[in-house]
Image (cartoon, rainbow, N blue to C red):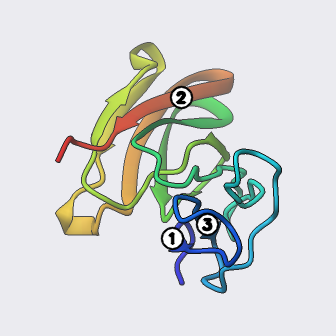
Amino acid sequence: MTAGSFVFNRIAGVSPNSTSVSASGTGAAAHTPNAGIDLPQAQPLSGGHSDAVLRPQAKFGTLVWKGRVEGSLMVTVEDNRPSTGVLSGDALPAAALILAPLDRANSTLDSAPGPGNHYRRLIFTATGHGDVTVRFKWTLPSR
């Protein structure tokens, strides 16, 4: 199973409207006493230099990149792993999405996730001197 994919399973002994979310596909999830719904604990995505976390069935989110820049720096984020720097916030869902840079003064969107890269690659250029933060708001289109 790829990072960021979730499987939804019914839990025995819980009301029919309750759902368990499992990142492993086994149906095992961390238990929380919250309205009969078991959700996994937030876990960082595996690999890369990232602490981005996926929310199950998120319809929108904000991906945040932080890194050291001297002038300009091209950054590639593939499968939610940055080529340099650190990611946090809501990981990209590897699906068709609407993407908007929130920090236009210090970033340029060079290539957005799309069908040609299976919605798994984002390329942007960060500009500045020192520690720089670049944020992207993403939204899944209405169906």
At horizontal 49% and vertical 65% (from top left) the residue drawn is: 79
Q: Which of the marked residues, 3 or 1, is nearer the chain's N terminus?
A: 1
Secondary structure at numbered mark 3: strand
Q: Is residue 26 above or below residue 3?
A: below
| Residue at numbered disc 2 | 134
Report if the CB atoms under discs 2 and 3 are less than 8 Å apart.
no
The picture places residue 108, in percent across and down from the top left corner, at 35, 30
Residue 76, horizontal then vertical, whole percent:
46, 54
Vertical relation: 118 (above or below) 86:
below
Within-10-Å neighbours for mark 1: few <14, some 14–19, many 20+: some
Q: Which residue is mark 1?
A: 5
Task: State which tag comes first along the sequence, 2 or 1.
Answer: 1
Left or right of 29? Residue 89 is: left
Disc marking residue 102? none
Measuring from the top left, give residue 134's x and y in whole percent. 54, 28
Q: Name which residue type carries label 1.
A: Ser
Farthest-out residue, top: 105
Left or right of 131: which side holds 141?
A: left
**Residue matched to label 3:** 21
Q: Secondary structure at mark 2?
A: strand
Q: How far is the residue under mark 3 from the one under mark 1?
A: 10 Å
* Type of amino acid under label 3: Val
Q: Do labels 3 and 1 touch, CB within 8 Å?
A: no
Label 3 neighbourhood size at 10 Å, few (<14), some (14-19), many (20+)? Answer: many
Q: Nearer the viewer, residue 122 or 131?
A: 122
| Element assignment for label 1 | loop
Which residue is pictured at 38% across the width and 37% down the height? Answer: 138
- Which residue lies at the image location 31% right of the left edge and 59% below the top edge? 95
Query: Which numbered mark, 2 or 3, is in the foreground of this view?
Result: 3
Image side of residue 82 versus residue 100, left or right: right
- Rounded to the nearest angstrom, the CA distance separating label 2 from label 1 is 25 Å
- Which one is nearer the viewer's eye here, 15 or 67? 15
